[in-house]
Image (cartoon, helix red, strand yellow):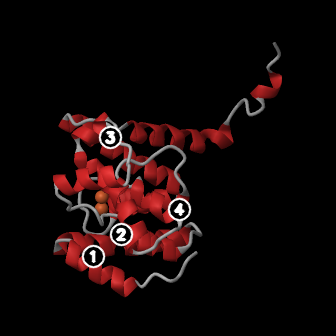
Amino acid sequence: MQNLIDLELVKKELKRKLPLKRYIHSLNVSNTAVKLCRVYNVCKDKGEIAGLLHDYAKYLSNDEMCKYIKEFKIEIDEVINSQKDLAHGLIGAELVKRKFKIQDLDILNSIRYHTTGRKEMTNLEKIIYLSDYIEPNRKFPGIEEIRKMALKDLNKATLMALDNTIKYIIIKGLLLHSNSLLARNNLILEMNASGNICPDIREDIRW
Ligand SMILES: [Fe+2]
Ligand SMILES: [Fe+2]
């Protein structure tokens, strides 16, 4: 893990770039991620940095977003194209890579995919996704259940957060990104893997 990142400099830059409320949210996500990293044996320095920087690109104008998408050759699909806010993770990862010389792929992917999730998320990706959802200032019915589950079962808690988000998207009539669906299915498959009734099914296949 690279440990050359000056966290004070990161915080100073965040304070300059984000409204106060979003800056506090970033600190909260970072602190929540550090706690979860301890529980799940993930490098807490990575959790701290990814949590701090996950919303780095949240307040770009539409023009700035389009400029960076072109400049960094970020591939966007029709869902992201019509809901540009979904791109703030993708752009943020590219910006922090350059601005703070962050090379760690796990940190970058945690920032990149924190809005949608994706198939085969690493534990750090799950932790950042979940921390964004349950940080102390988040308030909605059922959050305490997810906070409790977050300390017991990372997959289950991430799935609960994803399910709630997907339900909200559907109720609001918004577009659902396919990465969220892939993330959900993959989490369920991961959770079911130990109870797979035919683990060796491939060996039994005969043509
Ligand atoms: Fe975000
Ligand atoms: Fe966030």
Q: Earlier in the sequence, mark 3 or mark 4?
A: 4
Q: Secondary structure at mark 1?
A: helix
Mark 4 residue crowding within 10 angstroms, few (<14) / some (14–19) / many (20+): few
Mark 3 and mark 4: span between their CA atoms? Answer: 26 Å
Q: Are marks 3 and 1 in contact (CB under 8 Å)?
A: no
The residue wearing badge 3 is 166
Label of residue 105 in the image: 4
Q: Nearer the viewer, mark 4 or mark 2?
A: 4
How far across and down, in percent of the image, does residue 106 sit? 52, 62
Q: Nearer the viewer, residue 52 or 4?
A: 4
The residue wearing badge 2 is 53
The amino acid sitting under disc 3 is Ile
Mark 1 and mark 4: span between their CA atoms? Answer: 21 Å
The amino acid sitting under disc 4 is Leu
| Residue 151 in view | no
The residue wearing badge 1 is 14
